[in-house]
Image: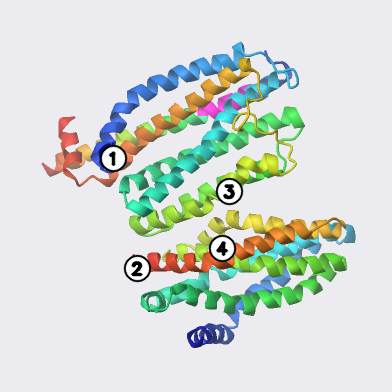
């Protein structure tokens, strides 16, 4: 367990000391979500319909802001090569890194979600389901995003590339999440969508860290 | 000749077959220019 | 037989095979397209429910089948490339990606032109249309990724992985009409019972599907020849081809 704890501590500290890595996307999430009532209409009925979807999309976009800087700084200064060549399996390092990022950025996002939900006049069941769907969905989003970040780690000077390529792959999770919130606010059953989100999460958690580590090794050792 | 659907049918067939024809012509042209370039490279070398 | 498959890994053999296939594919495509279009527009009877408007099916269904079929065949090439490191498989991927994207685009456009007279709208966000649109974005993403990576080797590898990752969309598209309540009609051909379409309409449809399929083979043969020449331009067999011409 000691290497795990040390890896996690390293990632956590590096994030803690560079607040802009996670703070700026969070602020973007808040500001951009706030744009929607200003741009469309402040009518509570309309905002309640949009609210779940807007928050989900903004959470996704905040993630897209972080992804280019997930592996590239380590790739550029050679740390990634050290990790890939070391005897520990790369999936260990990948999971610790993603865990640190997720705790540092996604958890505050989910803490802020009820407040933003109130701004969008969402009912309390809708907010509850929204937070649960985010808890179940954001790790999957992060894992798939990290997969694409691993594939594009050696690309120079094309910051938007990850966002373009990863969005089609993230839409299923997005749709499951927003569907659950919509059904909750309409009073219909939402357990099915949450269950599917949980299933996707289970698949992602078990399969993707190994795949991400493998891809990093392939891309770095080219 | 197809009643109210005439415009839709002709535009659908036209777009589909037109795009496919355009793609085929494009790829034939690409091949011939690659061949031509190889020829000039070869001629320049010998 | 394995010897024959093994020899296909060589670029020169593939080039020769593609060159020999082209005239046959050209004749087949022209014949099938002419017969198919005549059958589609003149010979087949109007539908009792949709009237003349259903005729768009004769371009919409073949291009839909090919948009999925090409992605599937590209995935097989990706596996062959990753496992056996056969470079011709990567050349096939490079050449077939734009064609698959084109078929997806044609599917969406012809479908939308069918939707307007039939359902009254050019577009609807139901499961099948949305997942086909996502397929178009997946194709675009793979092409963008392959073009973005610096070396051809990394581009090929990363592209192959991305193709396999995107493969999850294919079952979603195919089964979307049975998993969800969609506006799009259900499966008529690719199901395990008899096709639920009249024979007089089925025949031109099958001809058009065959026409699009042989067109794809024609396109891939021509484009593959160009791609192989480009990749192998420093080899002996390419130089010799030039001096023979």
Q: Secondary structure at mark 1?
A: helix
* Chain for numbered disc 2: A
Residue C122 coordinates in the image, percent (x, y): 71, 35
Q: Are marks 2 and 4 on the same chain?
A: yes
Between A99 and B11, the residue placed more toward the observer is A99
**For residue B36, side relative to residue C218 (left or right):** left
- Please tell me how crowded label 1 is: few (under 14), some (14-19), or many (20+) other residues with Cα within 10 Å: few
* Chain for numbered disc 3: C
What residue did someone put label 1 on?
A: C2
Checking the image for residue A144, the label placed there is 4
Distance of label 1 from label 4 (alpha carbons):
38 Å
- What residue is at 50 percent from the left and 38 percent from the top? C69
Checking the image for residue C169, the label placed there is 3
Distance of label 3 from label 4 (alpha carbons):
14 Å
Distance of label 2 from label 3 (alpha carbons):
30 Å
- Decide whether residue B13 is among the magenta residues: yes
């Amino acid at each position: 367990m000691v290497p795990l704890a040390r890896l996690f501590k390293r990632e956590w500290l590096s994030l803690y000391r560079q607040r802009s890595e996670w703070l700026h996307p969070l602020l973007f999430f808040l500001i951009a979500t706030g744009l929607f009532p200003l741009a469309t209409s402040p009518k509570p009925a309309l905002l309640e319909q949009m609210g779940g979807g807007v928050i989900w999309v903004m959470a996704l976009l905040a993630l897209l802001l972080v992804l280019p800087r997930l592996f590239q700084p380590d790739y550029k200064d050679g740390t990634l090569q050290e990790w890939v060549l070391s005897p520990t399996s790369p999936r260990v390092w990948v999971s610790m890194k993603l865990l640190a990022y997720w705790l540092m950025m996604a958890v505050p996002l989910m803490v802020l979600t009820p407040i933003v939900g109130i701004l969008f006049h969402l009912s309390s069941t809708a907010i509850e389901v929204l937070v649960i769907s985010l808890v179940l969905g954001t790790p999957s989003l992060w894992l798939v995003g990290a997969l694409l970040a691993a594939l594009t780690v050696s690309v120079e000077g094309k910051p938007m590339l990850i966002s373009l390529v990863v969005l089609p792959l993230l839409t299923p999770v997005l749709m499951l999440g927003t569907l659950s919130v919509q059904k909750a606010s309409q009073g219909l059953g939402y357990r099915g969508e949450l269950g599917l989100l949980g299933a996707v999460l289970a698949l992602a958690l078990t399969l993707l860290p190994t795949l991400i580590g493998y891809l990093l090794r392939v891309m770095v050792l080219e | 000749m197809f009643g109210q659907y005439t415009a839709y049918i002709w535009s659908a067939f036209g777009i589909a077959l037109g795009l496919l024809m355009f793609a085929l012509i494009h790829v034939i042209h690409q091949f011939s220019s690659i061949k031509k370039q190889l020829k000039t490279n070869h001629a320049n070398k010998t | 037989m394995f010897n024959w498959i093994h020899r296909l890994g060589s670029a020169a053999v593939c080039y020769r095979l593609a060159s020999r296939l082209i005239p046959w594919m050209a004749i087949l495509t022209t014949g099938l397209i002419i017969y198919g279009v005549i059958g589609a527009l003149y010979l087949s009877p109007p539908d009792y429910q949709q009237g003349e408007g259903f005729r768009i099916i004769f371009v919409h269904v073949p291009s839909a089948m090919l948009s999925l079929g090409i992605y599937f065949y590209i995935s097989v090439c990706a596996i062959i490339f990753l496992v056996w490191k056969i470079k011709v498989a990567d050349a096939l991927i490079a050449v077939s990606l734009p064609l698959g994207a084109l078929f997806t685009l044609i599917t969406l456009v012809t479908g939308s032109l069918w939707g307007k007279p039939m359902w009254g709208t050019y577009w609807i966000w139901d499961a099948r249309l949305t997942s086909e649109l996502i397929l178009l974005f997946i194709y675009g993403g793979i092409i963008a990724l392959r073009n973005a990576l610096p070396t051809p080797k990394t581009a090929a590898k990363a592209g192959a992985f991305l193709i396999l990752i995107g493969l999850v969309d294919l079952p979603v598209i195919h089964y979307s009409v049975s998993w969800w309540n969609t506006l799009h009609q259900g499966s008529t051909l690719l199901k395990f019972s008899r096709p639920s379409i009249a024979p007089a309409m089925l025949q031109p449809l099958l001809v058009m599907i065959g026409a699009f399929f042989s067109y794809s083979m024609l396109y891939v043969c021509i484009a593959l020849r160009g791609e192989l020449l480009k990749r192998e331009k420093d080899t002996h067999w390419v130089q010799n081809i030039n001096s023979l011409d």
